[in-house]
Image: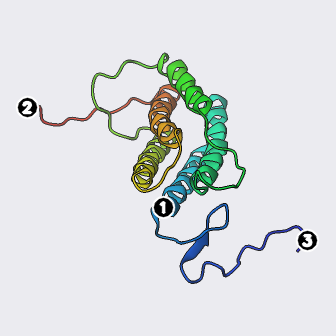
Amino acid sequence: MGENALKIYTKTGDKGKTSLFGGDRVTKDVPRVEAYGTVDELNSVVGVARSLDPPEEIDSILREIQNDLFTLGADLATPTDSSSSIQRIQSSDVARLEGHIDRIDANLEPLKNFILPGASQLASTLHFARTVCRRAERCTVHLSGKEEVGDQPISYLNRLGDLLFVLARYANHLSGRSEETWQGTQP
């Protein structure tokens, strides 16, 4: 193992605690760890979507998202009053997501009904990512009720859920797969 290589195991979490950026030790079940842990899970699901060899336009956006999610994870792992100097999610990151949504949504038929997640494997995986994103958003909202999280993490996750929905629809559009509408009972 090289001098600068990180060990995979440290044993410091064996008693159910972990370190936040800045050095504070907390139990692994606190809302802050739940929030950034769910963001990490989301990043993995986005990675699964990328492993399905999406069209370059979608893959490029998913690559951006994965990088953003590392930034967001660090943001959530660092209390806002920490002296640690880290990159945080910015309003420009949220605006970039909005630009992707507007550009891609312009290529899609307007929604007139609820759609069932599915059709293509890529779209199904992007819908799965969307639901994990919404859980990460709920975890971050829960955290924000207990501790300061800054202005952008919740906005970013909210917009990302919208983008993942649009990307799922776009994946089906590009593959020629039809979306199935919900056939619920009408009042």
Q: Taking 177 as reference, is 183 left or right? A: left
In the displayed structure, does residue 26 sit left or right of residue 165? right
Q: Earlier in the sequence, mark 1 or mark 3?
A: 3
| Residue 187: numbered disc | 2
Element at label 2: loop
Name the residue type under label 2: Pro
Instruction: Tell me the kind of residue under disc 3.
Output: Gly
The image shows residue 44 at horizontal and vertical percentages of: 58, 54
| Residue 6 coordinates in the image, percent (x, y) | 80, 69
In this rendering, the label closer to the viewer, 1 or 3: 1
The residue lying toward the viewer, choosing from 59 and 74, is 74
Q: CA distance from mark 1 to mark 3?
A: 32 Å
Residue 53 seen from this side:
no
For the N terminus, the image quarter is bottom right
Q: Is residue 26 above or below residue 130?
A: below
Report the residue marked by disc 1: 34
Q: Secondary structure at mark 1?
A: helix
